[in-house]
Structures are given as structure tokens and as C-alpha cells.
Amino acid sequence: MKRDTSWTSIEPPAIDVAAASASAVVVDVEGDAAVDGTPKNENHGAVENVRATSPSSAEKSSSRPAGRLWETALDPDSLKARRDAFQSSCKGLPRYYDYRSWTETTFMFVDRAPGNYAWAWALCVVVAAAWTAARKRWDALRGEFYDLEELERMYTLIFTTVGFMLVFRMARAAVRYWDCRAAWGAIIFKSYSLCDNAIVSIGPIAPSQAEELVRWCVAFGVGVKSVLRRERFPFEQVVGFLGADEVETMEADAKHFALYCARKMRRAATAALMAVEGEDKLVEMIKSQSPNAAVESIRAMRTWKSDAREVTPELRYPSAHHPIRKMEPHLAAQLMQTMEKDIAVLIDNLGTMERIKATRLPIAYVSHLRTILMGFVLCLPFVYEGYWGWGTIPAVAAIAFALLGIEGAATECENPFSPKRTNHLGMDGFCEATQREVMELLRWWRKEEGEE
């Protein structure tokens, strides 16, 4: 069926190629398929994707896994490698428990994060034991000067104030924890939506670029985890999606892995929706006639101008090589806008977690709370030893455990990104869940293509 080219005069938006004016055009050679998913050019042995970049960056060009994405990502060896990598990274944390079991939850100890308040609790118990023993040992300490039982009523008022402050502290920590979990939920959902949209909408016209977007979308989640934990990008968790050279290039060129992946997704979407067919042949023809004019010609071809002839009229442009759009412009624009919004949502939720990680509660509040809390518990034996006797020691130990434990729990949950803490978010599990969703999409895509 003959293609309707009545709207082919509208070209894609301009790209910045100013840096290429001094070094002309660098050709990035990929031997697997063209940008639009067409078979490899047998005459030239490779497909030339023109990129306006410098030779130094082109020398570090990376290679993606060979074959269709559903072949590499669903390969049994790749599946096993990713599964083992996630299990090794998470170390079995967070530990899931039966929230209905009072026995299991009541007698937990390590999972309560006692390390956050152990020294403060020990200090309170030691002071209680020392004062109780001293009062029993020396009669001079039992005089009216050391009789502080009259402060009992004041202690009741102080306890009310401490209780309100602890409730606020715990509530703020819970909100921060939930905001991080909600952000990860949005990342998982938007990753699925973006990949599904790429496969359904871009797959039929540019399967190579659809796969490119899906690959870097999967890598985005792993990049978020790596950025929040300040760790290296784990290639083992994206085996079958990215190549080792691609991960190495990303680690060398980018400090923020997630933003690098987002940029790759944008480039893939732009190449599929705003690029033109026949571009590689046209560029080859232009270079053969006038290498010096190649950069300006390519700029014109990728702008909204009607024709590259306006810039280089002396060149010959056979009609067979005139580039045409892959998708009707207004449809391409709508789809590009939708994908851009999805990518923006991914970045926005990453920003939410980075904001929470970098912003602590004001030091004035935390310092004031801990000062009052420690003063309240440390002074308990001086006020109540006359009533409790030797029972002061276990009483202070229990009260300190209750009050300091709330502050310790809040400290544990306000920045829930460590892979070594039971109560922190299971980000490895979130990345694995995203990959499972994407693999399901790939299975459907393979079935629709009739290759199953």
C-alpha cells in the first residue's frame, strides 16, 4: 500500500549540534539493527546512526545485548543471574512478619533497632542502680535534703509534654517512611505504563527504539536504588537488559545513574517519534558529495524546515532518498507528550526520596526532645526511689525502654534506604517487581509478533 506523504514536509525538532561543527559528524556503528528496527544493511555491513557528538565520546560507544529484548531478558541464565543478584543484595531484608501474631511481634528484639538508643538506656539504668545503692548504703543520703518525692506532681506535667513531643516525632517519621513507599509505588506503576506504551505504540514502527526505552526504564529503578544507597550500579541486576559495556560507560560518564537512564529513555522516544526514515541513506549521500556541508544539512533535516535543500541547494537529493516521517505528526506529538509526562513522574518521585534523604527534622526540635527525654528518665530514681526502693532499677529500665524506644523507632524509619536495616524499604524487591512486570509485557509482545 502506498504511503500517504502529504504531511512529510513537517520535520522533527532541532537538536543541539553546535559541538559537532569542529569535528563534523561522528558515525555510531551498531551491527544489530537500524534505529527504526529495519534489518541490517547487507551492502555496508552495519547501520550508520548519525549523532552530532565528539569523537572522544563516540570512542566509548557501548554495545547492547545481541538479539531481541525478549530473547535476552527472558533467557534462563539471565533470569537466574538477576534473581541471585537481588537475593544477595537484599540479604533477606526487610523481614516480613505475621502482623496478626502477637507472640511473634511482642517478643521481637533485634528488629526493634535497639542500637539506636542502647547507650542512652544503659546510662539511665546505671544511674538508677547507682543512686538506689547509694541511698541504701549511706544514711546521710536519706535526709530531707535529698528527699525529692515532692517533685512527683511536676513529673506528671513533664510526662504529658514529653508524650506530645514523642507522638509528633513518631508521626513525622511515619509520614516520611510512607512518602518514600508511595514514591516507589509510583515508580513501579509508571515504569509499567511507560514500557507498555512504548511496546504498543512505538513497537510497530520502531521496535529497536521501543526496546531501547524499555531497557533503560528497567535500569532506572536500579539506578534509583543505587543513588539512594550511594553504591555502584549493579550490572548483575540488569543482565539481559543492559550490556556490561553500557553499564561501564554509564559509571564512567554519570554520577547520577537514574538521571542518565531517564535521558536515555527520552532519546529513545525522540528517535522513534521525531526521527525520519531514510535518514542513514541521506546522510551517506550528503557526506559523499560535500563532507563540510554534512553538519548543516543534518541540522536542517532534523528541524521543522520543509527540506534540507534550503541550506545546501548545491547538493542533489534523489526523491528515493528523501526522508519521511514514521508517524503522523500530531499523533507523534501526543504520544511524545504522554511519555515525557511519565518520565517526568519517575524523576519527580526520585526527587521526593532524595529530598527526604537530604532533609532531616530541624535540629532544634530533635535536640530539645532528646534533652527533655533524657533529663526526665535520668531523674526518675531521684524522685521515686523513696517509693519503689530496689524496684526503682527495673522500673526505670522499663520506662526508659518504652520512651527511648519510640525515639529510636522514629530515628530508624525517617530515612529508610539502608540495605542492612530490617525496617528499611526493600528496594531490591521493588526493582525485581518492576522487572517481573516488564517481562510479562515482553512475553505478550513476543506472542503478538508470532515468535513464541
Image: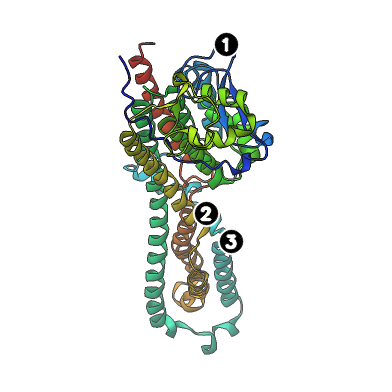
Q: Is residue 185 visible?
A: no
What's the amino acid at mark 3? Trp
Q: Are marks 1 and 3 in contact (CB under 8 Å)?
A: no
Tally of numbered tags: 3
Q: Mark 2 or mark 3: which comes first in sequence?
A: 2
In the foreground, 221 or 271: 271
45 shown above or below 353: above
What's the amino acid at mark 1? Asn
Mark-to-mark CA distance, 1 and 2: 69 Å
In the foreground, 395 or 321: 321
393 shown above or below 213: below
Q: Mark 1 or mark 3: which comes first in sequence?
A: 1
Q: Is residue 48 visible?
A: yes
Q: Which residue is mark 2?
A: 114
Q: Nearer the viewer, mark 1 or mark 2?
A: 1
Q: Residue at x 49, y 33 (%)?
A: 308
Q: Residue at x 43, y 85 (%)?
A: 150
Quadrant into which the C terminus falls: top left
Mark-to-mark CA distance, 1 and 3: 74 Å
On the image, which quarter does residue 52 sit in?
top right
Q: At numbered mark 3, what does the secondary structure look like: helix, strand or loop?
A: helix
Residue 43 numbered mark, or none: 1
Q: Residues within 10 Å of mark 2 (few under 14, many from 20)?
A: some
What's the amino acid at mark 2? Pro
Q: At numbered mark 1, what does the secondary structure look like: helix, strand or loop?
A: loop
